[in-house]
């Protein structure tokens, strides 16, 4: 069985990142991480013993300049990252998830889910679905729904596959982390409310996406996406200022070392600003909340290979570092 890395990767862009860490048998703490593999306990550095990562995000505009200064401070109480446990970088109150937001991914899924008696050829089906995607983009209608914070787990934690999940699948995604309360913000101002970005793997049981008892009810996201640990998150939050263009990042997922997803966020139908603005028209986004932006082509349904016990997923997004999670079948 593949072995997890001894120490988390610090292959992120920019001078620093934000994370949540802990020493063995100790409480978690918000950490300022720098590329050479050192971390600074921000509770001590900022003189706030009860400080959390979400607490930092709630005062993002105030704290960000101090983080920049601390990252360059050579006399600070840095400690090695090696030996610390890396948790999900933030505990959000709300998780906003985007569906059907990568053009090629949606086309692949729709083709894979065709009825056996569908008279269309694969080429005809792809053409028709592509036309639907183009119409959605023209009509400016993102698809956003709600996930549960309890599904979030750390970027190196094992993922337990529930016994009832017949078709567990991966979906690596770019996630925006909210900095300020956002309600009915415009597309033009939406990115001002984003503190930074992180990596999310939005696992989905394909067998329970659609209700079997009554098709008219539609999708069942509670059942298919929100098992404990179904959203590995992190390892780091990269400040938005360190990411030149969230619409031009490479999203890559490897299964047992083999590339399954390898696509640019350029394929998104709706960018980060549009998704944040759209979600804010109905809900009030809060500091630390996540806006997941959808997953690109290359999921398990496309390959005809779903997750099973012992599988190892390595996920990375340009500039955001990398996560590694191992799948473990639920004990009977």
Image (tube, rainbow, N blue to C red):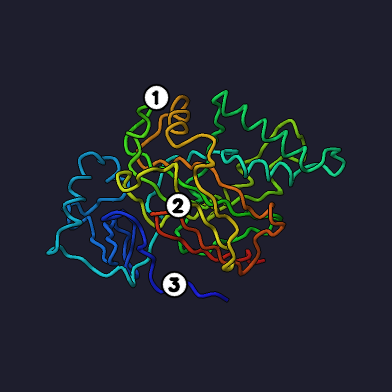
Q: Quadrant of residue 303?
A: bottom right
The residue drawn where x is 37% and y is 66% is: 85
- Marks 1 and 3, how far apart in space? 42 Å
Q: Position of residue 290 (x, y in %)?
A: 43, 42
Most extreme residue toward the left, as rendered?
A: 75
Q: Nearer the viewer, residue 216 or 99?
A: 99
Q: From the image, tell me which residue sits under label 3.
A: 5
Which quadrant is the C terminus positioned in?
A: bottom right
- Real-space CA distance between mark 2 and mark 3, rounded to the nearest whole angstrom: 18 Å
Q: Which residue is mark 2?
A: 199
Is label 3 in a helix, a strand or a loop?
loop
Residues under numbered marks 2 and 3 in contact, where contact means CB atoms less than 8 Å apart: no
First along the sequence among labels 2 and 3: 3
Left or right relative to 11: residue 142: right
Residue drawn at the location 38% of the way across and 31% of the way down: 190
Left or right relative to 222: residue 52: left
Residue 97 lies, with reference to residue 32, above or below; the image says above
Q: Circle 3: is it few (<14), some (14-19), or many (20+) Cα within 10 Å?
A: few
Residue 259 image position (x, y, % from top left): 58, 61
- Which residue corresponds to mark 1? 186
Judging depth in this view, the residue of 52 and 324 nearest the camera is 324
Q: Secondary structure at mark 2?
A: strand
Q: Residues within 10 Å of mark 2 (few under 14, many from 20)?
A: many
Question: Residue 154: x, y in percent?
Answer: 44, 58
Q: Residue at x 60, y 67 (%)?
A: 311
- Disc on the earlier residue, 2 or 1: 1
Q: Position of residue 168 (x, y in %)?
A: 65, 55
The residue carrying pointer 1 sits among few (fewer than 14), some (14 to 19) or many (20 or more) residues within 10 Å by Cα, namely some
């Amino acid at each position: 069985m593949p072995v997890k890395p001894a120490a988390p990767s610090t292959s992120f862009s920019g001078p620093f990142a934000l994370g949540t860490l802990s020493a063995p048998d100790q409480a978690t703490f918000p950490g300022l991480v720098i590329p050479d593999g050192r971390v600074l306990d921000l509770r001590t550095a900022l003189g706030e013993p009860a400080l959390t990562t979400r607490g930092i995000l709630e005062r993002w505009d105030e704290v960000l300049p101090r983080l920049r200064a601390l990252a360059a401070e050579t006399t600070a109480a840095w400690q090695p990252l090696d030996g610390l446990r890396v948790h999900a970088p933030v505990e959000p109150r709300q998780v906003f998830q985007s569906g059907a937001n990568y053009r090629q991914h949606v086309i692949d899924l729709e083709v894979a889910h065709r009825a056996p008696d569908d008279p269309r050829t694969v080429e005809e089906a792809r053409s028709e679905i592509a036309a639907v995607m183009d119409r959605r983009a023209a009509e400016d209608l993102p698809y956003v729904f709600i996930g549960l914070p309890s599904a979030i787990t750390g970027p190196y934690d094992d993922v337990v596959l529930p016994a009832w999940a017949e078709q567990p699948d991966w979906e690596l995604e770019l996630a925006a982390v909210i900095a300020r309360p956002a309600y009915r913000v415009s597309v033009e101002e939406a990115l001002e409310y984003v503190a930074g970005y992180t990596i999310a793997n939005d696992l989905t049981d394909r067998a329970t996406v659609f209700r079997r008892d009554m098709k008219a009810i539609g999708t069942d996201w509670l059942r298919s996406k929100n098992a404990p640990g179904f959203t590995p998150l992190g390892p780091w939050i990269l400040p938005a200022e360190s990411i030149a263009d969230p619409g031009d990042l490479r999203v890559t997922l490897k299964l047992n070392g083999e590339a399954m997803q390898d696509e640019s966020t350029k394929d998104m139908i709706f960018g980060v600003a549009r998704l944040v603005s759209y979600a804010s028209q109905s809900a009030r986004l809060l500091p630390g909340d996540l806006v997941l932006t959808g997953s690109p082509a290359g999921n398990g349904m496309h390959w005809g290979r779903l997750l099973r016990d012992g599988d190892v997923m390595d996920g990375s997004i340009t500039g955001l570092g990398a996560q590694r999670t191992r799948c473990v079948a639920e004990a009977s």
